[in-house]
Image (cartoon, rainbow, N blue to C red):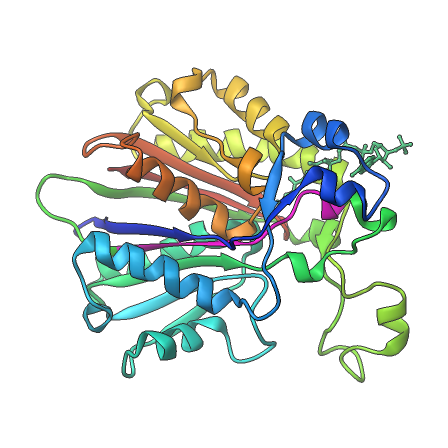
């Protein structure tokens, strides 16, 4: 079956820049703590009225432009988000609507930080089996509206941020470029180590005043535990996906690792024995944008000329679920 390959990439982030100093006025934290523990210098947060779908649309238009395609050329949408604009329906159908595309399928994927890798695997399978030709894959998140902006929530609030990235995938050609392999995993035993408890359909009503008063609507994380698993699972998955693709770590041109904490990325780099020129990080400017981090990294690298046709690139992510995975790509 033919590989699917990348036809275009795009990103969109809110204009509003939130500095560490701004956060230190909302909670007991400092620029120094945030920089040394996470690497983050600033992040983007939406202002009222901005939506995940709207960021997804902007990223999509840039990706379509690079691909030389119009919205009408798309045959399906896979939309990764853990922070949809509404409980239901998913963001995919809203994106379809604002793009003005008729009745193509639009699927939401909820796999949190690993959402883009999972979404990519669905799109790739659709293309390989010949079911759809040009598939849009989006990772878009608004985390800032689900953060507890006080000292009680500081271990989470200083990390997470908003943004979107999109890629257009299409059938590969004879040059062998495209997606080579995936490695996907989850381990539900750790579901509550990074989660949002409410609203939830197991509650009557789905969210109560008591739950809101207790802060159950906020993203909650056991940071140390997530860190401990992330630094093991990402290198393990990178090795597995390279092995499935019949490639070696030494052949890697670029590793694009989920941007959760610069210290995690540094441990992963060291574990894999990669030089600085084999990795690319942008967490300093964007923070952790969950499902959007990988397509944002990808778009920046493509536009900066860091990735050229024929290069071997691996994308890897780890996050809530726990869910993790990697994709190996011949660019
Ligand atoms: O995207 C999905 C995956 N997410 C991740 O991969 C995140 C993984 N985890 C992490 O990145 C880190 O665990 C954090 C950055 C969240 C926290 O860093 P840490 O070095 O693990 O800190 P800690 O939770 O062990 O806390 C150390 C101290 C505590 O104070 P005490 O108990 O030692 O007095 C915290 O209360 O740092 C305190 N602390 C803060 N201090 C200032 C926690 N957050 C902050 C803060 N500012 N924002």
Q: Is residue 96 visible?
A: yes
Q: Is residue 108 left or right of residue 190?
A: left
Out of 310 and 302, give the one closest to the viewer: 302
Residue displayed at 79% across by 56% down: 148
Total numbered labels placed on residues in the image: 0
18, 120: nearer the viewer = 18
Q: Residue at x 16, y 57 (%)?
A: 68
Residue at 62 percent across and 68 percent down: it is 48
Specify whether residue 160 is painted magenta.
yes
- Whole-percent x, y for residue 97 in the image: 37, 80
Question: Which quadrant contains ligand 1?
Answer: top right
State which quadrant residue 329 falls in. Answer: top left
Vertical placement of 269 versus 140: above or below?
Answer: above
Q: Nearer the viewer, residue 31 or 83?
A: 31
**Does the image show residue 170?**
no
Q: Position of residue 80 (x, y in %)?
A: 47, 60
Q: Is residue 277 magenta?
A: no
Q: Residue 53's spot in the image, x, y percent?
A: 47, 68
Tell me the magenta residue range: 156-168
In this picture, is 67 found above or below 276? below
């Amino acid at each position: 079956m033919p590989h699917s390959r990348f036809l275009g990439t795009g990103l969109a982030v809110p204009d509003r820049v939130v500095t560490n100093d701004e956060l230190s006025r909302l909670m007991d934290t400092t620029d120094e703590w945030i920089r040394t523990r996470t690497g983050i210098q600033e992040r983007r947060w939406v202002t009222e009225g901005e939506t995940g779908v709207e960021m997804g649309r902007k990223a999509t238009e840039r990706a379509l432009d690079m691909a030389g395609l119009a919205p009408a050329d798309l045959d399906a949408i896979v939309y990764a988000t853990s922070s949809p604009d509404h409980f239901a329906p998913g963001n995919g159908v809203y994106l379809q609507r604002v793009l003005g595309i008729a009745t193509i399928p639009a699927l939401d994927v909820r796999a949190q930080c690993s959402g883009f890798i999972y979404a990519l695997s669905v799109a790739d399978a659709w293309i390989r089996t010949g079911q759809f030709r040009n598939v849009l894959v989006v990772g878009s998140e608004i985390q800032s509206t689900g953060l507890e902006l006080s000292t009680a929530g500081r271990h989470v609030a200083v990390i997470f941020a908003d943004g979107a990235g999109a890629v257009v995938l299409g059938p590969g050609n004879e040059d062998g470029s495209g997606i080579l392999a995936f490695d996907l995993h989850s381990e539900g035993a750790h579901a509550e180590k990074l989660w949002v408890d409410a609203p939830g359909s197991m509650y009557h009503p789905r969210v109560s005043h008591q739950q809101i008063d207790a802060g159950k609507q906020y993203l909650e994380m056991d940071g140390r535990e997530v860190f401990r698993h992330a630094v093991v699972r990402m290198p393990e998955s990178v090795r597995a996906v390279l092995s499935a693709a019949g490639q070696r770590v030494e052949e890697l041109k670029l590793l694009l690792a989920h941007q959760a904490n610069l210290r995690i990325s540094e441990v992963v780099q060291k574990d894999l024995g990669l030089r600085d020129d084999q990795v690319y990080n942008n967490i300093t400017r964007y923070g952790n944008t969950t499902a959007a981090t990988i397509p944002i990294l990808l778009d920046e690298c493509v536009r900066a000329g860091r990735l050229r046709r024929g290069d071997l690139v691996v994308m890897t992510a780890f996050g809530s679920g726990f869910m993790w995975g990697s994709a190996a790509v011949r660019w």
